[in-house]
Amino acid sequence: MRLGEIVTAGVLAILSIYLMWKSTELPVGYIAGEGPGGGAWPFWLSGIMLLSCGMIALNWWRGTSPPSQSDEPMLDGYGWRMLALVGGGIIGFVALVNIISMYGAIAVFLLYYTRALGRHPWTLVLPLSLLTPIALFFFFEGAMTITMPTGMPFMDPIFDIGYEIIY
């Protein structure tokens, strides 16, 4: 646990620094008459994450956090199994985005996560898996005018219905 805590904090700190550097390709400050620049949110959120990693490292060094005082392994058999199942689900989600669209991949992932891993009843799983991508579609495509990947051409008729409602 002790090694896992500091390694995780270190990896996240490196990612934070990279994201802060990358977000400076866009303005990170306030633009008069417009508001925050395009890189502001990623920059400052990454900065907060970096500070959090610093606090984790400090607590690790002082030995004040429970993981920093533990000699137990970071993951037991159940933890490794869940890591593989959730990680596999996320890999499947990413693989499906270009095939069945971002929204279709969200629906499949929610179905998998809530039913297969969470063992929730179908009365919760189906409405959640169907209504969440629909709500996200209207939020991103309609309200925010941000287009998400629509997948292969066979998905176009489904999106045409949503676009007719929006426009």
Image: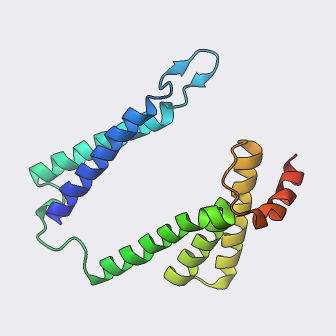
Q: Position of residue 69 (x, y in %)?
A: 12, 63
Determine whether, in the image, residue 77 is placed left or right of residue 20.
left
Determine whether, in the image, residue 144 is placed left or right of residue 95.
right
Q: Position of residue 145 (x, y in %)?
A: 73, 42
What is the tally of numbered marks visible in this picture? Answer: 0
Residue 45's place in the image compared with 100, above or below, is above
Residue 142's place in the image compared with 78, above or below, is above
Residue depicted at x 72% and y 55%: 137
Q: Position of residue 39 (x, y in %)?
A: 50, 31
Determine whether, in the image, residue 113 is placed left or right of residue 56.
right
Residue 92's place in the image compared with 117, above or below, is above
Q: Residue furthest front?
A: 153
Q: Quadrant of the N terminus?
A: bottom left
Determine whether, in the image, residue 83 is placed left or right of residue 133.
left
Residue 110 visible in rendering: yes
Q: Position of residue 38 (x, y in %)?
A: 55, 30
Residue 11's place in the image compared with 158, above or below, is above
Among the 4 quarters of the image, the one containing residue 162:
bottom right
Residue 106 visible in rendering: no
